Image (cartoon, rainbow, N blue to C red):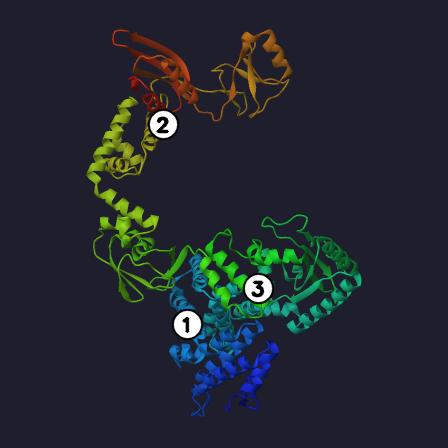
Amino acid sequence: MVKVRQDHPIAADGQVDIEAWIDRLNHLQAQTDATRAELRRAAELSLSLVDIHHDDDHSWGEDFSCFRIGLEMAEILADLQLDQDALVAAMLYRAVRENKVALPEIQKHFGDTVAKLVKGVLRMAAISYQRKEGEERVLGSQAVEQAEKIRKMLVAMVDDVRVALIKLAERTCAIRSVKNASPDRRRQVAREVADIYAPLAHRLGIGHIKWELEDLSFRYLQPEEYKRIAKLLDERRLARQEYIDNMLALLRNELHKAGIDGEVSGRAKHIYSIWRKMQRKGIPFSQVYDIRAVRILVPTVRDCYAVLGIVHSLWRNIPHEFDDYIASPKENGYRSLHTAVWGPENKVLEIQIRTREMHEESELGVCAHWRYKGTDTKNTRDSYEQKISWLRQVLEWHEELGGDVQHLQDDIGGLNEDRIYVFTPEGHVVDLPRSSTPLDFAYKIHTDIGHRCRGAKVNNRIVPLNYHLNNADQVEVITGKLGAPSRDWLNPASGYVNTPRARAKIQHWFKQQARDQNIAEGQALLDREFKRLALLDIDFEELAKKLRFNTLDDLYAAVGASDIGVGQVLNAAQKQLDEADPQQPLIPFKAKSPARKKDSDFYIEGVGNLLTSIANCCNPVPGDAITGYITLGKGVSIHRQDCNNILQLQADEPQRIIKVEWGNTPQSTYSVDIIIEAYDRYGLLKDITTLLDSERINISAMQTLSDKRKNTVDMLVTVEIRGFAELSRVLTKLNQLPNIASARRKHA
């Protein structure tokens, strides 16, 4: 027996009584004789590691803490109905972590499974330490992002659901034990629990652990708010729970009277949950109607509405606090009836009513409670969500099968994890696609680091650059002074880079090295295009500045490397000309403005500069199919195509009917002469006009001159275009027609 403090939960008359503790555990989970013997062995080993040769409690308190917390962890897991191996691993984990006993020793005495579980929890603990070291360097929204990445890393590492549960139990004990620690220590533990482990418990659906972690972390992170909400509740949690229990008994009795086979459960709302709802909805405490909540599960949808009637007959419902998500499910498919009533003692009670099938869908389907209430909105194909779903199903199976989940652990191999999570030397988390290498990591951090990468260390060990990184690896990039990637890195067979980002950055670097060639090609490309468009008076130096290039060579190089398109340069040139001579923009020909209905924004194409008016008989609006009628002295009247008047006019005066359309934008058009030189063939003219029609280019005039001796034809086609980009596109397509030798704009 070991003397301990009188108030310790596992002490009886100041003594540690292992048998009494095992009996206590048996109340949470029935234990076989073999399990009791194994738990006794583990407890005795853990107790033997406590230094009992010191009288001062403080001097051996840390040793005893390993023992005490191990037993507390086992109690938490027994309440979750975990198996013998998990309980033993929990009892011994702290001793291994504090180097009181070696992992091989655990493996020798308790088997491979227990040792594997302890090792898995140790790996998760290493992530916690990294988080603390880098915590002060991460501020604002980055802190939220880092916490999410760490949660994903934890889940990615778990290949046995019991590892995650042991870690949750350990953190629960940790935050319980910091009550008397320094404020800084309390905040440190609370921040980690709030950011990482409470959300993980939430995702796994372990409600009572989640609530405790949230409440305790909230208490230490925002003590004033915690006290304020606690005071507003004006009753102890135990009293609230007693109230809920009374309601459950009453509802069970009413369901029994009605002959409905229903399951009734409930809980009192926790302090953090109340505060979070007040913050999220911006409401005062008086408008939080679900401080006390009850859930009723029934066999059928008809039973749901029958129970709703029973509830509303017992208590008066609160207006505007009823939601029928069965008749109108949420977007994610969530179904349930929600109502709030004034219960006994004039206290508000929230009640959820759903079928067992609906409950199963909300817990394990795509509309799980954490999915519609949480902040993560990624789709169900995300590997993190898939892993979470798998973990939660294992928990369900574990409960159904009475604790034998060992054979289920192999199922994790079927999950296609597509991301890994690694550390920088400062402790920040970086997520990468699976099969990423140190080079991929370097380019994810910064392009310059990737260019200058000369080697890498993973977990303080030199590795080749094509080494495949694993979850929780700490990666350090060894860099040179100058950036010069190797062309070998782009060889797929070498396996140096496996991410599109890294490959694109390397390719871009080599593209930059051929600058002289890019300058020459870019200059030739622009010269050829501008000559084809008859743009001979462009100030290219000014054009480069307009496009935010330092020099004209930079512009040429960008065009040659395809970093900027010729169309973008043409648009800038058009703006340059417009600014130089607003009265004669783009082209030395008169611009034509589209017709518009007076005092409106309706533009009509196909009527030129004629006066137009909207017919009062049918009042067409943009989007209607329309037809034009040339009136006597009043321009063109615009009718709907199904208008009775226009149908009659088509029969009586078809020569006055013209085809018109709504215009999309109030753009001006410009008359441009195009010279086409071609070898004559049958259908050439038809192909040209068809192409221009498909491009919605209006032809104003056309002249042709054929040379029968040479079998050639020269054409001068006057078209109406909207700008350089459109002209360039049309000329390019004309040059692609069979027998076209050249198509270019005529010089002014």
Q: Considering the numbered disc 3 on the image, is that residue within a helix, a strand or a loop? A: helix
Which mark identifies residue 725?
2
Q: Splitting the image into 4 quarters, where does residue 251 fall?
A: bottom right
Nearer the viewer's eye, disc 2 or disc 3? 3
Q: Is residue 260 above or below residue 493?
A: below
According to the picture, the residue beneath numbered tag 1 turns out to be: 119
Marks 2/3: CA–CA distance: 62 Å
Q: Does the image show residue 155?
A: yes
Q: Earlier in the sequence, mark 1 or mark 2?
A: 1
Q: Earlier in the sequence, mark 2 or mark 3?
A: 3
Nearer the viewer's eye, disc 1 or disc 2? 1
Q: Is residue 412 above or below residue 646?
A: below
Q: Amino acid at mark 2?
A: Ala
Q: Considering the numbered disc 1 on the image, is that residue within a helix, a strand or a loop? A: helix
5 with respect to 335 (left or right)? left
Q: Residues within 10 Å of mark 1 (few under 14, many from 20)?
A: some
According to the picture, the residue beneath numbered tag 3 turns out to be: 396
Q: Residues within 10 Å of mark 2 (few under 14, many from 20)?
A: some
Q: Amino acid at mark 1?
A: Lys
